[in-house]
């Protein structure tokens, strides 16, 4: 399993200290001179990392502002998510989810954790903070990417393009204290390359 961290050139990658044992590859996404810079940078960052660094059958992908929640067995949850993808039960297994309607999901128990599976096509999850993806799903993502740059990445991933589930409760926190891949930090000049 490859471990990828999606970041931008501004804030530090909060997650890397926690997952150093996984030998993560940090993929930095530059600023772009477009009106929707945040979503563009985020979507492009995920796509570029999957394109350049996915060499195994699965990849564990983190955004730079993910932080493990010490109340949960987050290391074992990574192993469980990877197992679900390797078993070909799901193309993507999300290790963080928020902003969704529980009524649109059913619960499944597997590998010692509870997982939520969507039951309707009308679904929305903020969940690209941390996930495991299969090589086939990454190839599909990359192939479709050319016309979707700038799309909100959560709309793309959790739409009907991928067979996915997500862990419940989430073992990772979205820590926006240092900024996000979507935004430039305050009081910092944007360098357009």
Image (spheres, rainbow, N blue to C red):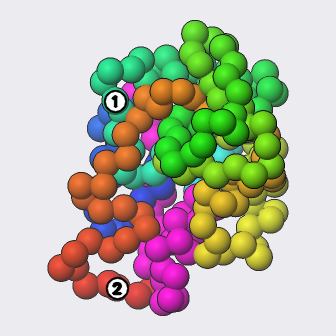
Residue 186 locus on image (x, y percent): 22, 75
* Residue 60 appears in the picture as rendered: no
Q: Which mark is residue 69?
A: 1
Which one is nearer the viewer's eye here, 7 or 97?
Answer: 97
Q: Which mark is residue 191?
A: 2
Query: Residue placed at 70% from the left, 60% from the top?
Result: 156
Q: Secondary structure at mark 1?
A: loop
Picture quarter containing residue 48? bottom right
Picture quarter containing residue 166? top right
Residue 169 locus on image (x, y percent): 48, 27
Q: Secondary structure at mark 2?
A: loop
Region of the chain picked out in magenta, as a range: 20-47
Does residue 39 lie above or below 2 as drawn?
below
Work out whether mark 2 precedes mark 1 in sequence or the reverse, and give the earlier one. 1
Which one is nearer the viewer's eye here, 113 or 124?
Answer: 124
Q: Is residue 66 left or right of residue 42?
A: left
Q: Is residue 56 left or right of residue 78?
A: right
Does residue 118 lie above or below 157 as drawn?
above
- Mark 1, other Cα within 10 Å: few <14 / some 14–19 / many ≥20: few
Query: Residue placed at 39% from the left, 52% from the top?
Result: 64
Residue 136 locus on image (x, y percent): 81, 44
Does residue 155 lie above or below 87 as drawn?
below
Residue 107 locus on image (x, y percent): 67, 22
Q: Is residue 146 left or right of residue 47?
A: right
Extreme residue in the top direction: 112
Extreme residue in the left direction: 187
The stretch drawn in magenta includes residue 86: no
The stretch drawn in magenta includes residue 40: yes
Quadrant where the N terminus is found in the figure:
top right
């Amino acid at each position: 399993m490859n471990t990828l961290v999606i970041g931008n050139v501004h804030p530090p990658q909060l997650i890397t200290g926690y997952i150093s044992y996984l030998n993560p590859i940090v993929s930095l996404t530059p600023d772009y001179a477009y009106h929707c810079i945040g979503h563009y940078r985020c979507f492009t960052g995920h796509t570029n990392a999957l394109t350049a660094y996915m060499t195994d059958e699965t990849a564990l992908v983190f955004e730079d502002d993910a932080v493990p929640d010490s109340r949960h067995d987050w290391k074992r949850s990574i192993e469980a998510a990877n197992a679900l993808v390797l078993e070909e039960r799901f193309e993507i297994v999300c290790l963080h989810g928020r902003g969704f309607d529980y009524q649109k999901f059913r619960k499944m128990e597997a590998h010692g954790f509870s997982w939520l599976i969507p039951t309707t096509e009308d679904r929305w999850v903020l969940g690209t903070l941390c996930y495991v993806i299969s090589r086939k799903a990454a190839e599909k993502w990359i192939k479709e990417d050319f016309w979707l740059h700038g799309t909100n990445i959560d709309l793309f991933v959790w739409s009907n393009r991928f067979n996915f589930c997500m862990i419940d409760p989430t073992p990772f926190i979205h820590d926006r204290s240092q900024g996000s891949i979507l935004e430039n930090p305050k009081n910092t000049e944007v360098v357009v390359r």
